[in-house]
Each structure stands twice: as C-alpha cells, then as structure tokens.
Amino acid sequence: MENIHLKNGNSCVAFCLLFFLIFTIYSNTFNASWHFDDKPNIINNYGLHLQDLQPESLFQTFFSNPTNPWASNTKLYRPIACLTFALNWYFGKDNVAGYHIVNILIHLLAAFFLFLAIQKLSGSPKLKNRFKDSSYFIALLAAVFWAVNPIQTQAVTYIIQRMASLATLFFILSLYFYIAGRLASFRLKQVMFFFGSLTAFILGVGCKENVALLPFSLILLELIFFQDFKWQVNKRSTLFVLGIICSGFIIGGLVLYFKHDLFFFLKGYTCRPFSLTQRLMTECRILIFYLSQLFFPAPYRLSIEHDILISTSLFKPWTTLPAILSVICLISAGLAWMKKWPLFSFAILFFFLNHIVESSFLPLELVFEHRNYLPSLFLFFPVAAGCNYLIEYLKKRKYWLSWLAAACIIFIIFGLGMATYTRNKVWATEKSLWQDAMQKAPARARPVLNVIFDLVHGKNANPAYYEGALKAYRKTLELDHSRKPFKPGILIGMAGIYTSLGKYQKALELYQEVLNNDHNNAKARFELTGILIKLGKLEQASENADLLVSRKNAHEGYLNRKGFILLKQNRPREALPFFQKALKMAPYFQTTLLNIGSAFSLSEDYTRADWFFKKALHLPPENMAPCLLLIENSLKANKHEPARYYTNILLSKYSLWAIKAQLNSFANDAFLLPIDIKLMRNWLKQEIMHKAQNMG
C-alpha cells in the first residue's frame, strides 16, 4: 500500500504547482473592485469593522448580521467567514487587495486538500488495486482541472463569496480527515483524524449553512468506497434505510431550527416571479446548464446574470422534460454503477447531493455560478482517471501517442487558465461586470439597474448621466426581474434621480403613483417624507412618518425620521421617545446617538447630550458631525475647555476648507441636525486666530 501514499517531496511539488497556476491565473484580480453584495456584507456592515484585536471585539464579529449592522445581535451569522472579513478590515480597511489575496489562498488550500483527499481515497478498498502507481498523477490532475476552471471565478474573485469558498475548504478538509481516519491502522490515529473531521465540519457550518450536507456526503463516500455489497437486496435495503435516516435528519433539523414553521420557505415565494413547482422544474434545466458550463467553461458562457426562462410546465420551454429526465437518468446511473464505476458514481451523486440546499425548494435566486464551487469538487476525478487510462493505453500501443495525449492535457489546462484570466478581467470594476452581464443576459433587468446605480451613485457619478439613467430605467420596465413586484422599485429609483436634479414635484408624483397602487410601500413613503422635509412641508412629512412608525416591522430608520421631523419642528422632548426606541433596536447606529444628543441639547440638558455625542464620536462612519456637535454643546453649556479640546481634534483631522464646507452644509441641508452656525463660526475663527498667534 506504500506506493499509493504521498511522499513529502511529492506533496510539496503538488502544492508549488498549484500555487504557481492559481496565483498566475488570478494575478489580475488583486485590484478588482467591490461588487454587489460586498457592500452590505462588508463595507456597510459596521459590526465587522474591527478597531482592536481584543477577544471581546473578535467575538462580537460572530454576530454581525448585515441586515442590521447597528443592532446588538444575539444570533450567530456565519461567524468564521465574518471573522476573516473583520481581520481583513482591521489590517487593510476597504483596500480590496488584502481580501483578494486571502480569497486566492483559500482557493489554493481547497485545491491542495482536494488533491490530498483524492490521493488518500485511492487507498480505499474499492480503489487500491485500480490505480497502483497512478494515484498521484490522477489526484493532482483532478485538483488542477477543478482549480483552474473559469466557473470558479465567481467564488474566488467575488469577495463576499469567500463564504462559499471557505466553507468548501473546511468541507474538503473534513472529508480528507475522515478518509485518513478510515485508513488509519491505529485506534489513536483514527480518533484524532475523526476529531479533526468533526472540527472542520463545525468550522465549515460557521462559514455557510450548506456544509450541513457533509454527513450525507460522508455516508455516500462510505457506501461507494468502503462498503462491499454482496447481495443486491442488501444494497437496496441499506440505501433505503440510509434514505430514511437522512430524511429524518433533514426534517428534524428543519423543525428544530424553524420551530413549528416547517414550511417557512413557502413565504419566500410571495416575492418571486415563480412558484415552488416552477422552481423545481427550472432548476433541473439549470443543473444541466451548470454541468455544460463546467465541461465547456468558455468565458462568453459565464456571467453574474443569466437569461433563464422559467419552466411553467413540462413542455414550456421544451427543454424542461428532457432536463428532468436527464437529471433522473444521471442520478439513477450513479446509484446503479456504485460498484462497477465508483468514480463516476461518486462524482455525479456528490454533485447533485450538494446542490440540494441552493438548487431545490428554497426560494433563492434561480442561478449563480458560485453554487458549483463545492458540488464540483470531485467532478473531475473520473475525468483525470480517464486521462490516465488513455495515456497508459497509448503507451502500450504507440509511445509517441501517449506524449501527444499528455500535450493535449497540458494544452487544455493552459486554455482553462487563459479563460480564467480572461474572465477575471470582467470583475475589474462594477461597471465592467454589469456591462458584461447586460450583453449576455439582455432580457434581465438587474444588470441594467446596477449599471444605472453605478452611473448615479458610483465613484464616477456625474449629473450628466442622469437623463441617460432615466431612459434606462424606463427600459427596465419591459425586462425580466428576479423579484416581484418590480415596477415600484424602478419608479422609486427614477424619483431619486429627479430629486438629485432638484425636480421635487416630479419625484413627488412618482412616489405618489407608487403609493396609489400600494398604500403599504414603506420605501416610497419613507422617500416621500424626505422630499417633504426638503420642501419644508413638515406637517405632511409628519403624517407620513406616523404611518411608517405604526407598522409592525417599523425599524430604527422610520423612528429616526419621525423624531427628526419633530426636531425640525422644535419639539425635542416629543422626539426623544422615538429616538430612544430606535436606540434599543440598534444601539450602535451613530445617527440615532447624534439625534438623541441633539434632542437633549435643544432641551438644554447639556450633560446628557454630551454623553451621547461622545459615544457617537467613536462609532462608524467617521465624520466631523460628532465633533462639531460636541463643540456646540460645550459652548452652549459655557464649558470652553471641552470645546477647545474637541476643536483641537477637529482641526487635527480635517482641513479648514472641509470644515467650512460642512458648516455650510448644516446651514443649507434640510437633512442635517440643527446647529448654531453663527456661534460655531465665531468660535472656530477665534480659536484659529489664537493658534496662529501662539505659533507666531
């Protein structure tokens, strides 16, 4: 058995080869920008913005749910993945290079442990006499095929999909330890390896929930590579029992996690343009599409968005029934050939098994390429074994043909690497990514909407683009959408542009159109209150804010808006209960703390105001508003020493030009808190002159 185990030198060579290939084909991604879900999950998820490496701070990152980053969450949210993002933020803030380097290293380690797992699996009872001295070559080739495949770019280059790639790393690590434990000769080694497998499994679940399918993958691996069925009836009985056990685990887990709402997932279909039945039929076509992408991953076939027609019946579109039959045939073949063709059986059953979470009944988006990262792990195992068989066969016939076959394999790897490098160019910027998607999925609205968003709100936003953005918004009304209803969202987006152009009446008409069709549209009503505040129509704004805060799911944004209107009406005491309720919901939201501080300051309770302003000073996002409000509050309380202290902080961080611009904003922007501009300008002028005299 020694000939099938790795030597240290061989494993180092394999690692170095994988390192060279992976870092070469991903070398153009180090500056690829933030995209799509990166922003709410990392950039705007302040719970991940570590300020120190104290154990308490690190522990808090485990609860940084992006849906409400200011709340003191008590529910874990993918803690291991979130911890890695938080550490990235601590060492590099929003510089993308560090995030990409970590993502590529994760991909490298996943490929390496895939190599080790396949090589180790070659020592299982079903395979140890099949490959003999070829296990190293087959394992390495399978890992290379998987690692350089262009479809993996979405899981590697798309920063937030570290959740998927890191989960896969722990998944393959757990499999490797399990295989090593099964092949270990001593009980102590077995216990250690199985403990390692369990630990990796727990860490994997802490990255993404679909790692929960790992026990079923281990059962599949055990059945195919370690068990020997002498009688067909025994095989069928065992599979039936295992199926019952697995189903029990799944149902029990769902009941435990979601308590008494077993069919929780059905609620998600209310906002989707497809039903549960339609999704299941469509996913069969998508699974076949995924397989075609994996084995023919040309860059022109890859996109963050795909035009996928929803299957409304078995015959519409006509490919629905053939796809369903193909999936059934592939799974049936995998089950039937477990003994005769174990590699094919495991590869295909592993693929479909690990697509169950994201490609079955849950009301998720229909198609995303990163979902193949884990399921495709062993898909190239039989391909690599086939390549090895071909080379060995040709060696016995015409030796030069074996070299030709090897050259063809190298050419394929080179082609896959070039395709990956080419595909990664598309991820360079938000604009290039969505423009690529617009070309490949012309019937989909999301690429157009994201291009519009980049034009209007991106780094290079320019009012000159607004008219073009409005035309593009109108075009999206005719396109397909992943959610319903979609028209209100487009009208709200158009109203936002009209607001930016200062055409408030047109914006009001669009918001009103949305509310006429859907009285409960909170987004439209919230934005409507903003326009009314700008126009000084505070009574109307207050009436609409009352409707928002009376909702069952009223969040801190609505409460802050209502309180802010009361501040503008010079009713700070009435505003306080709304701010305090908002603070309970999200205690780390800087806006709420500043609002409460202003309410106390306007009520001449300067001591309490000072406490809230100080707390806000140390919370993200970093800006000069807390400093200015602390200075004003100290001056109003006739405490010049604290005012001077915060003035020094202000002048050390910001230029005089920036401070002047901010004060002008306070004077002219209806959305900024009330502040005594004259008092502040006189004080700052006095302090700056005093500093200049001292320096002179």
Image (cartoon, rainbow, N blue to C red):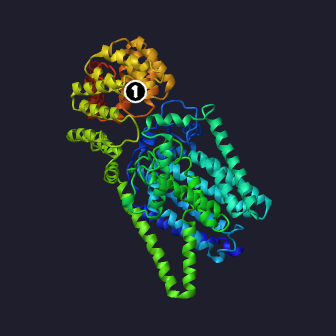
Residue 412 or residue 653, whichever sits in front: 412
Viewer-closest of 160 and 433: 433
**Residue 693 rendering spot, x and y as whole percentages:** 27, 29
Quarter of the figure with the C terminus: top left
Residue for point 63% across, 68% down: 341
The answer to which of 83 and 462 lies nearer the viewer is 462
Q: In which quarter of the image is residue 688?
A: top left
Is residue 607 something that shows in the picture?
no
Q: Position of residue 211 (x, y in %)?
A: 60, 49
Percent x, y of residue 429: 34, 51
User: In which quarter of the view is residue 248 placed?
Assistant: top right
Q: Where is residue 400 in the image (x, y as percent from the top left)?
A: 50, 87
Q: Is mark 1 on a helix, strand or loop?
A: helix
**Residue 514 makes an appearance in the image:** yes
Q: Which amino acid does label 1 sit on?
A: Tyr
In this rendering, the count of numbered labels is 1
Indicate whether 60 appears above or below 572: below
Q: In this view, does 235 lie above or below 403?
A: above
Residue picked out by circle 1: 645
Q: Residue at x 49, y 84 (%)?
A: 401
